[in-house]
Image (tube, rainbow, N blue to C red):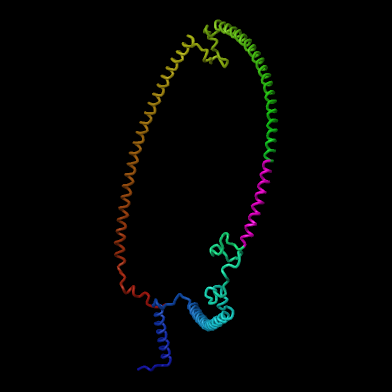
Amino acid sequence: MEVAQPKDLQQDFALARRRHAELCRQKRVFDARNRIIGGDAEAWDLQVHDQKIKEATEKAKHETFAAEMRRNDKIACLLEDRQRRDRKNLCKAINDFQQSFQAPETRREFDLSDPLALRKDLPARQSDNDVRNTISGMQRFMGEDLNSRERRRFQQEQNREWALQQQRERRDAQAGQQCAEDLYRQTRLQWDETAKHMQDLGTATRRAVCAAVKEFNKNQATESAERKILEKSQEHEDNLAEISNLLHGDLLSENPQQAASSFGAHRVVPDRWKGMSREQLEQIRLTQKQQVQEKLRLQEEEYQRDRGWDRQRVQNARTALLLERQQRRQQRDLRRALDRSNLSLAEEQLSQKKYMKEVYTNQPTEDYFTQFNTGSR
């Protein structure tokens, strides 16, 4: 049996402590829920501390609000009591005022229920000018007034004055009408004299105008007759001149020179041209023959040119066919060479795979993969 030395015990203790620390570290590292590697622990602690301070602040704020609410409730209760007392005092004051200053006899409709109303009431009619004698009361009718005699005497005097006034107005109206008739008569006579004078002046004026018109018409007739004679003689002279011009002019004589234009010898005047001459017709026919020959020559040249292009096109097609055949042969040779190259490469790759299978014979097992991720370092 070996004796345990203090040094050995110390080493064993250190080894056990390291093993325990390693186990704790593995638990922290391999536990995805509690792992804090890669995080800021101080920041997290600071956040927790801030959260606690925030919660404490919120709690203090809620307590303050609760105290404020309790104080407001007390104040509301006191105000409600005061309002109730004030309402009671107001009702009492209103009742006292009504009893003192609003007695039943001071009301507006008290006379409807007054027990002494008949004793206090006035008679139905005191005089003719009583304001209470309304139409609906039927206390006063026409002709039943108290001072009917004075009223009748006043009415008679008033009728007499009206009659005298009407007589005066009638006399004044008759005098005014007579004056108006006299004035109208004088005005009518004056108008008649003026109309007669104007009629005489109009008659004299019409006579003078008729005489002047008659003289003017006479002069116009004389001038018209003379003008017709002159026009007739002038027309006769014009006709003679026209006949002479037609007989001796170029129109009827068919002079070809009359169609010559002032713009050149190659142009003519259409309304004077009588047709082409024989020389001109011969020249036109000769020109047409030359044009036909020129057209035949051009057609022959075009035919020869088209044949040349056709030969050139056939030659080009033949050359293109030969080139295409040569290109196909070259592509076939290239494809064969490529196939041979691919075949040789495939054989080399197959031999390489066989060699790799012979060399690398060690296959990894599960023990090889389980040795990873077993430590915390």
Identify whether 112 is placed above or below 175: below
Residue 167 drawn in magenta: yes
Which of these two is toward me, 30 or 236? 236
Q: Going by the image, does 334 lie left or right of 256?
A: left
> In x, y percent, where is residue 232?
59, 9
Which of these two is toward me, 370 or 336? 370
> In x, y percent, where is residue 97?
58, 80
Q: Going by the image, does 12 lie left or right of 168?
A: left
How many tags in the picture?
Answer: 0
Residue 114 location, quadrant = bottom right
Identify whether 140 is placed above or below 314: below
Which of these two is toward me, 16 or 280? 280
Q: Which residues are magenta?
A: 147-174
Residue 350 location, quadrant = bottom left
Quarter that holds the N terminus: bottom left
Q: Which is the main secondary structure of the residues drawn in magenta? A: helix
Identify whether 139 is placed above or below 178: below
The structure residue drawn at horizontal position 41% and vertical position 89%, both measured from the top left corner, is 13
Identify whether 104 is placed above or below 242: below
Q: Is residue 103 visible?
A: yes
> In x, y percent, where is residue 283?
48, 12
> In x, y percent, where is residue 224?
62, 12
Q: Is residue 71 visible?
A: no
Residue 116 drawn in magenta: no
Quarter that holds the C terminus: bottom left
